[in-house]
Image: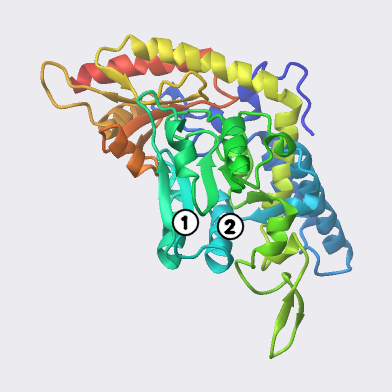
Amino acid sequence: MVTLLNPLHNIKSHFPVLNNTVNGYPLVYLDTAATAQKPQCVIDALTQFLTHDYGTVRRGLYHLSVGATAKFDETREAVARFINAPSSDQIIFTRGATEAINIVAHGFAEAILKPGDAVVISAMEHHANLVPWQQACLKTGAELRIIPVLDDGTLDLSQLDALLSGSVKLLAVTHVSNVLGTINPIEQLARAAKAKRVPLLLDGCQAAPHLKLDMQALDCDFYAFSAHKLYGPTGVGVLYAKPEWLEQLPPYQFGGDMIDSVNFERSTFAHVPHKFEAGTPAIAEVIALKAALDFIETIGHDAIAAHEHALLTQAMQGLAQIEGLRFIGTAPDKAAVIAFAIEGANGLQPVHPLDLATLLDQYGIAIRTGHHCAQPLMQRFGVTACARASFGVYNTPDDVDAFITAMHKALKLLR
């Protein structure tokens, strides 16, 4: 585990990539909502395992395999502690949050949904928590219902009871919006769902890096998130689920390691969590995820939240001084994600986000542009694309100052 005497002092020194320069400018990475940079401890964990300890898991009795299996199982235990799950058997390793949600959607399409049923999602969902349910409903004849989004980027919960009426089989919403930064009122959503006996799935990709998670307090039925947004490797995700759902839902994939017995007539499947983990997993990446979790725990969730909120406030205040800049998402409870569009000057066309990002890159500023895998949300706010700056634990007030300065320079050239 990395040791940080003052968790946020000289935080960038733990992230080698942030030593890079772009056109002579220090790299300012503001795309953490897409994927987070990796601390040295995660890089070291990958290198150590692949260099000295690599072996397959649950497949051998030799030293390397036994050691790899132990480290793999340690990560499962660490994830359970990180989200306060009752048991590590409720932790399923996947290739990412997208696969985690697809596992649930596949199971519901196969075993739960039928014509006349409904699934409720929100209008702010990432495509990964929209398209699987859309396709599951199309396959089964179920209805897809949408919770609207208000102008400030919060959910319009005035319609929630009506939307949850009838034969609703699932409520699936994001914990934190990847575009708006809105932190949704999960406790209220959970109470409403529980009152209607509707299971709740949460897309936690944007919440896991920023908020302290507690599955027992949230009382959701499913929770999905990705390692790479948590300062860990790509190719790894987590699905948490209550035991009754893990037993009830059918496997998503079939093959090695998820079976109990096989003959040419039939197969029986392993107990959870292995029932949903077909094939050789991303062993090194799962093991390195534990290093990322240790890194976050060492800093502390409260310290991370306070640090990122200060950066968010500083950036929002700086951007608000730019004429014609329109924030997309101004919820009072908001994570460190800022989406915005910029009107043109003197009746000219709006500034295209792609042009803005290209110029910002010349000053070493890395932001995201596009529809952010949320095209219906873009339509809701009357844009086809927008710019997005998102902050992580490694960002500093100097990064925000550099971003705002570069914005003014870029806009002088674009207007």
Q: Nearer the viewer, residue 21 or 59?
A: 59
Amino acid on which disc 1 is placed: Pro
Q: Specify whether residue 264 is in view.
A: yes
Q: Secondary structure at mark 1?
A: helix
Q: Could you classify mark 1 by the number of other residues whose Cα lies within 10 Å: few (under 14), some (14-19), or many (20 or more)?
A: many
Which residue occupies the extreme left position in the image?
Answer: 347
The image shows residue 36 at horizontal and vertical percentages of: 55, 36
The image shows residue 141 at horizontal and vertical percentages of: 42, 64
Colour approach in the figure: rainbow
Residue that badge 2 annotates: 104
Q: How many marks?
A: 2
Q: Is residue 236 above or below residue 32?
A: below
Upstream in sequence: badge 1 or badge 2:
2
Q: How far is the residue under mark 1 from the one under mark 2?
A: 9 Å
Amino acid on which disc 2 is placed: Val
Q: Secondary structure at mark 2?
A: helix
Residue that badge 1 annotates: 132
Quadrant (top left/top right/bottom left/bottom right) for the C terminus: top left
